[in-house]
Every structure is written in structure tokens, then in C-alpha cells.
Image: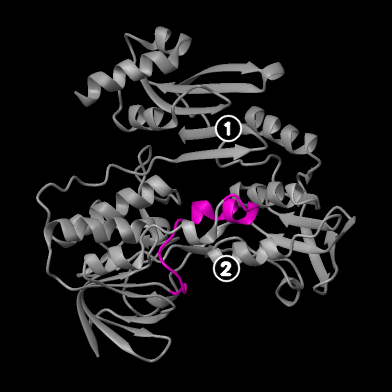
């Protein structure tokens, strides 16, 4: 049986961030990094660009083998963990082998969520969650054929755009009344909807697929409204769910994801969790939430790694703040923090339809709590910092709303000093 001081399961942003934090304090302790994918660590956020051909697969990796060797990391790609025995502090691999650990980080991410559509499991369909998914989907693009995408979230719209650019006729089926409801209000979503329509992508809102049947060559979808669609390619992008299957019987507490505290500790000694799989405190609410974003994965991974080595510089997790950036058909969009204004919030909005420009700022008690934009000059990173740092806006709010880019830069310069 192999033994390691630190075992990290999952090699994307949370796992790599934890790895770096551990090595800053512990230069000698053995580290084993395992992933079920048969390649070097990479970021899932790059997959749409692999699908489009803008990013070459061999150029997307977060670390190469030499950098892992330089850190004395035992890297095990193509290694799937099947079970966790928290009492014995060991995991069982698909091969039957076991790895014994002293400290364990679960950074297993999330898996695609299949909708309850009759016949879906028996019909060939695609998802976009791994490098292999992106390469397979890219190989299936055929000009003049029809593709149907289930779901109008970020992954669904990324897939739809790139399939359309590949010459396919694309129809998106979305059960809700707007696209990207988790990132933008209705007005911004309508602008994004229009951009897709203008580029030939048909989006059916308030619609569901109730049944599918077919083969690799042709799939027929029955719609809840009574109509039907035919597709040469079916893509399912209806959300993700944390990978927690290995925790059955382990004693690790799971709700929607793995429940963690402000140091990313689970309820079981010696086990931490970070990234898309972790359910941690929210920034705006006391309840614990999932936040499947890249900045959050990096931060949680760093905190977990620092806590695993008792780093005295550790600052506890302040809570999850959403931040997403999105490019579509030559436009740029972002959202940070609170999307929908709750009681006590005030909204400042600028919409210029003729130039396809949108900007929305949300304030609560003299603090910026949310910002979003389409083709806005605002810097998402600065907006994120202003929200996270609870920057006081009382004296500068009027000037900030009139010229948020310039004022925010001045404010951050003062804060960073």
C-alpha cells in the first residue's frame, strides 16, 4: 500500500492552488496528486476555446510534468478513487490499489447533471466538462447539420456559439424564461438572447424536452409544448452536481456538496474539501452554498492547503462571491456579486441598446454588492475586490456611478496601499 503525507484528489484549480500552498511551508512532505483524467492538470474554463479551435489542447495545461517533478509531487493521472475509508485514512482506487494518507483534500469538482428526459440515457449525446468531451464534440461538428443544446447556461451557450460558428444550425432549449439566469437580470439576458438570434442561433425559452429517441445519425426530441425537434447532434448542458460518490459510508457530511468550515475543513479530522465540490459559507448569507467559479476554487484551495500545513498567515474564508466573465459573438460580459437586488438595495443602471452596452451597479447600505455589464469598461476584478472588501461608497457613490472605472481605480489604489 502506498503512503503519502498529503493526498489531493482532483487536479484542477483547487487542487493545484492547495498544492502550491502546501509546498510553500512544507518542502519535504510527500504529496500525491490523483485525477481520473488521463492528462496533465488543466482549467475547465478553457474547454469552449478547445471546442472552437482557438486553444490547442497541448497548450492548455496548468502544470507540466517537469514542474510537478520539481515539486516532488507524485502525479497519478487516469486514477479514479472509488471509496474513502476515513477511519483508516485510506482511499481505494478503481484498480483495487489503496493509498494511505495523513491529510486528504477532496477537490473532485462537479459532473454534468442529466435532466429527467425520457429515453436520454439510451440516446447518444454529448456534454462539455472534460478535455476529452471538448475534443469529441469538436470532431462531431458537421456543416449544415442541426444541433440541439439542452440548457442556456454558460456551458450551453458556449457550445451553441461554437457549433454555430462551425456551420451547424443550432437550437437551444431552455426550461426557464431567460438565458443565463444565474448571472444576469432579465434585461441583460434579453440582450444576450438577441445576439444569439442575430447570429442564427434559435433559443426556445420556457420549453423542455420531455422525450428523446434516435441514433448517432438522427435524434428526435419531443417538447413539452407538443412540438418536436430533429438533431444530428445532441448536447446536454443542464447544470452540474458535485462529485461526492466516493463519500458513501465515510462519515463526511454532505448536503448539496461537501460541507466545510471557514478553513475548508470537513466534519472528519484530516479531511478538507475545496472548489466546485465544497459547500461553504456565502458572503451575503449565513447559509452554506456552492460557488462553482474559478476564483472561488483558487481561494478555497489555497486556504485548504495553508490549513493543512498550519500556515500562520492563513486568513479564514470570508464567504463565496460569484464572479463570471463571458465572451460571445464579439461581445464581453461579466457579473460579480449580487445579481438580483434584495430588500434594501438600490440599483443604478445604464443601457444603450444602439451600442449594445449595458451596465448595472447594486448598492446596499453605502456598499457595492453587485456589478454586471455587457461591453462595459468596468474591470470585473476591481468590482470583485470592492465587493469583497466592503468598500465604503457613501462619499463617492455619485461620482462612482458617473465614472465607475476611474473612481474604482482610485479607490483600489488607496485600499491596496
65 lies above or below 275? below
The quadrant in which the N terminus is found is bottom left
**Which of the two residues, 166 or 397, is positioned nearer the viewer here?**
166
As drawn, is 203 to the left or to the right of 62? right
**Which of the two residues, 343 or 41, is positioned nearer the viewer here?**
41
> How far from the left and from the top, in percent, is residue 125?
71, 68
Contact flag, marks 2 and 1 (Cβ < 8 Å) = no
Q: Secondary structure at mark 2?
A: helix
Circle 2 residue: 132
Colour convention of the picture: one colour
Q: Is residue 52 magenta?
A: yes
Whether residue 365 is visible to the viewer of this picture, yes or no, is: no
Q: Secondary structure at mark 1?
A: strand
Rendered residue at 80%/60% (across/down): 142
For residue 356, which quarter of the picture? top right
Q: Is residue 55 magenta?
A: no
Q: Which residues are magenta?
A: 36-54
| Disc 2: CA contacts within 10 A as few (<14), some (14-19) or many (>=20) | some
Give me the disc on residue 106. Answer: none
Circle 1 residue: 332
Amino acid at each position: 500500500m502506498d503512503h503519502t503525507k498529503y493526498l489531493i484528489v482532483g487536479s484542477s484549480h483547487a487542487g493545484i492552488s492547495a498544492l502550491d500552498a502546501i509546498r510553500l511551508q512544507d518542502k519535504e512532505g510527500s504529496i500525491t496528486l490523483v485525477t481520473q483524467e488521463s492528462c496533465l492538470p488543466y482549467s475547465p474554463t478553457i474547454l469552449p476555446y478547445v471546442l472552437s479551435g482557438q486553444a490547442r489542447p497541448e497548450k492548455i495545461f496548468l502544470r507540466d510534468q517537469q514542474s510537478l517533478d520539481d515539486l516532488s509531487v507524485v502525479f497519478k493521472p487516469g486514477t479514479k478513487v472509488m471509496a474513502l475509508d476515513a477511519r483508516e485514512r485510506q482511499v481505494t482506487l478503481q484498480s483495487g490499489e489503496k493509498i494511505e494518507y495523513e491529510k486528504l483534500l477532496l477537490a473532485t469538482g462537479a459532473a454534468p447533471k442529466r435532466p429527467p428526459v425520457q429515453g436520454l440515457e439510451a440516446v447518444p449525446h454529448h456534454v462539455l466538462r472534460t478535455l476529452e468531451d471538448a475534443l469529441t464534440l469538436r470532431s462531431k461538428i458537421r456543416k449544415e447539420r442541426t444541433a440541439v443544446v439542452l440548457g442556456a447556461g454558460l456551458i450551453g451557450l458556449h457550445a451553441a456559439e461554437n457549433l454555430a460558428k462551425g456551420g451547424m444550425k443550432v437550437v437551444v432549449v431552455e426550461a426557464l424564461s431567460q438565458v443565463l439566469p444565474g448571472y444576469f437580470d432579465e434585461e441583460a439576458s434579453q440582450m444576450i438572447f438577441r445576439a444569439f438570434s442575430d447570429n442564427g442561433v434559435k433559443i426556445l425559452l420556457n420549453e423542455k424536452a420531455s422525450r428523446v429517441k434516435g441514433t448517432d445519425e438522427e435524434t428526435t426530441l419531443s417538447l413539452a409544448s407538443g412540438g418536436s425537434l430533429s438533431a444530428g447532434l445532441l448536447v446536454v448542458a443542464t447544470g452540474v452536481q458535485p462529485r461526492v460518490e466516493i463519500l458513501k459510508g465515510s462519515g463526511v457530511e454532505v448536503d448539496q456538496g461537501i460541507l466545510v468550515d471557514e478553513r475548508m475543513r470537513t466534519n472528519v479530522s484530516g479531511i478538507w474539501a475545496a472548489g466546485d465540490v465544497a459547500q461553504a459559507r456565502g458572503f451575503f448569507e449565513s447559509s452554506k452554498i456552492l460557488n462553482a467559479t474559478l476564483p472561488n476554487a483558487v481561494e478555497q484551495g489555497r486556504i485548504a492547503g495553508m490549513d493543512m500545513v498550519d500556515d500562520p498567515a492563513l486568513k479564514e474564508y470570508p464567504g463565496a462571491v460569484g464572479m463570471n466573465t463571458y465572451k460571445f459573438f464579439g461581445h464581453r460580459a461579466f457579473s460579480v456579486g449580487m445579481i438580483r437586488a434584495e430588500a434594501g438595495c438600490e440599483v443604478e443602471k445604464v443601457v444603450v441598446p444602439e451600442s449594445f452596452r449595458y451596465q448595472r451597479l447594486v448598492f446596499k447600505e453605502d456598499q457595492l454588492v453587485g456589478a454586471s455589464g455587457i461591453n462595459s469598461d468596468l474591470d470585473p476584478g476591481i468590482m470583485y475586490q470592492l465587493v469583497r472588501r466592503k468598500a465604503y461608497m457613501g462619499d463617492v457613490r455619485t461620482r462612482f456611478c458617473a465614472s465607475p472605472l476611474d473612481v474604482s481605480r482610485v479607490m483600489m489604489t488607496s485600499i491596496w496601499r
